[in-house]
Image (cartoon, grey):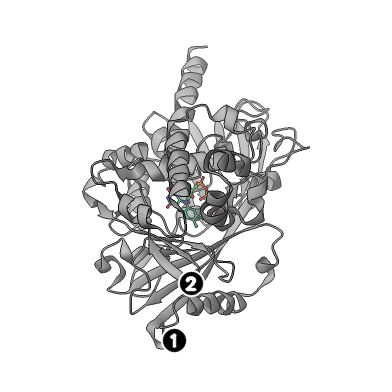
Amino acid sequence: MRIAIIGGGFMGVVLAHEISKNDAKATIFERDSQLGGLTTYQDYGDFVWDKFYHVITPTDQELVELLQEVGLDKKLHWRRSLTGYYTDKKFYSLSSSKEFLMFPVLGLIDKIRLGYTLFRGAQINDWKSLEKIPVNDWLIKLGGKRTYEKFWAPMLQAKLGENHKKVSAVFIWTYIKRLFRSRSSAAQKEHMGYVTGGYKTIFDRFENLLVEAGSEVLKGRTVTEIKAAQKNGLLVGHDGNFEHFDKVIFTGPLNALEKIVSPELFEISNVERPISYLGAICLVLVTKQSLTPYYVLNIGDNDTPFTGVIGMSSLVDLKETGGKHLTYFPKYIDENDPLWSKSDEELEAYFLKGVYYLYPDLKETDILSAHIHRAFKVQPLQELNFSEMVPRLNTKHPDFYVLNTAQFVNDSVNNNTVVKHVDRFMTAFNKELVGESST
Ligand SMILES: Cc1cc2nc3c(=O)[nH]c(=O)nc-3n(C[C@H](O)[C@H](O)[C@H](O)COP(=O)(O)OP(=O)(O)OC[C@H]3O[C@@H](n4cnc5c(N)ncnc54)[C@H](O)[C@@H]3O)c2cc1C
């Protein structure tokens, strides 16, 4: 059986790996010249590392198990990671319970209420009731208005911009569950993981395994159309030709799907309530000196153009980055934001102004290189009653499936959720295949 997978991001690659374990042959079509999608890698001159920052948390159980399965566990490193907060022109470390208790921006009552919100959030399992409540209302009800304004609002603004007013409480609940539970219970300290060589090592490993298993990985191949074949299966259009496959699974974002399938095959989503995505623009700096001791610095300050600082070199061994320091400055924006129309040079100048505002001692000569990375479709907005808006896995054609991050109704968009999503899909898909072969 030949199965086409459209998209060679993490979803497509993990899916192809699982399919290759059966008798079927997977063919990945990836439009970029390298695998990875949003998780792909970048040549920074002296070293290669992730294009956008990626980290593994101790709660990423399914992802860690998958890395073990493909023999990458020896390359997986866990390191202590610090979290900081910038507000009122000061940096605060919030990396331990003690530091949190001493955090002067919140009073004692606010801290107790914040602690209660985190505790309650981590206990909740019924996400369905949360998707009916706006995130702001939920956080204010549990933690109070002051805690919301001083602590949560800047974080939500950082992650979602003005769109935070539209999302449900599920959004923050998934973060609470993933991040705050990653504190090791004994030490109450955060630990984060990475694989030697970054995600390039992971994609190279999967590609080798796929080729060994007789599957195909086609890079630089854009699929331009998917249509029903006359009998069973589908025809996949690429490079001016159509190729027949028994099954086709699309893993990219919905706008890319809309361009290549007709409504007879698949209705993108609820027409009255289409899913909207947030994108991200990120400045990446390679510097001689370290800019920040924190892996994540959250920013509660409206004067910086970016919404956080990710100090990759405060987490990964400096050997990984040729002794240089790697720092990411992301900003999440919606598809109508005027920043998309700016050139890379304009964006670099705009973001760098914010970098110098935050780190006035940084000298221009310390910056070895600067890179602007853009991703237009990153985070499907988990609006109220999001589960009613998501696209189905099965389509109008029995051999065509859609599997993507817009279907994550009760989880944040990360690679552990990708692995779980693929696992659930494969359980149902394998049953279907067994059913088909016995009829
Ligand atoms: C700034 C940022 C930080 C992140 N940090 C983390 C983190 O710390 N930890 C974590 O676990 N996750 C993180 N993530 C999330 C992680 O990147 C996603 O979970 C993951 O990329 C989703 O993979 P995907 O394959 O579903 O989608 P994508 O990566 O979007 O892949 C879809 C692929 O489909 C291809 N495609 C689309 N249309 C076609 C077509 N017609 N023909 C051929 N190919 C096509 C695209 O080129 C793309 O490669 C982060 C993401 C971003 C942007």
Side of 85 where 235 appears, left or right: right
Q: x%, y% of residue 159?
A: 55, 54
Q: What residue type is labelled 1?
A: Glu
Q: Say whether residue 286 is visible.
A: yes
Q: Say whether residue 390 is visible.
A: no
Residue 101 or residue 31, whichever sits in front: 101
> What element does badge 1 sit on?
helix
Q: Name the residue under label 2.
A: 89
Q: How crowded is mark 2: few (under 14 residues within 10 Å), some or many (20 or more)?
A: few
> What element does badge 2 sit on?
loop
Q: Residues within 10 Å of mark 1 (few under 14, many from 20)?
A: few
The circle on residue 364 is 1
Q: In which quarter of the image is residue 235?
A: top right
Q: x%, y% of residue 137?
A: 63, 41
Residue 108 or residue 230, whichever sits in front: 108
Q: x%, y% of residue 398?
A: 62, 25
Q: Which amino acid does label 2 sit on?
A: Lys
Vertical position of residue 183 compared to residue 43: above or below: above
Vertical position of residue 323 compared to residue 136: above or below: below
Q: Quadrant of residue 242?
A: top right
Q: x%, y% of residue 33?
A: 49, 60
Residue 38 or residue 248, whichever sits in front: 38
Residue under the image location 29 percent in, 61 percent down: 316
First in sequence, mark 1 or 2: give its number.
Answer: 2
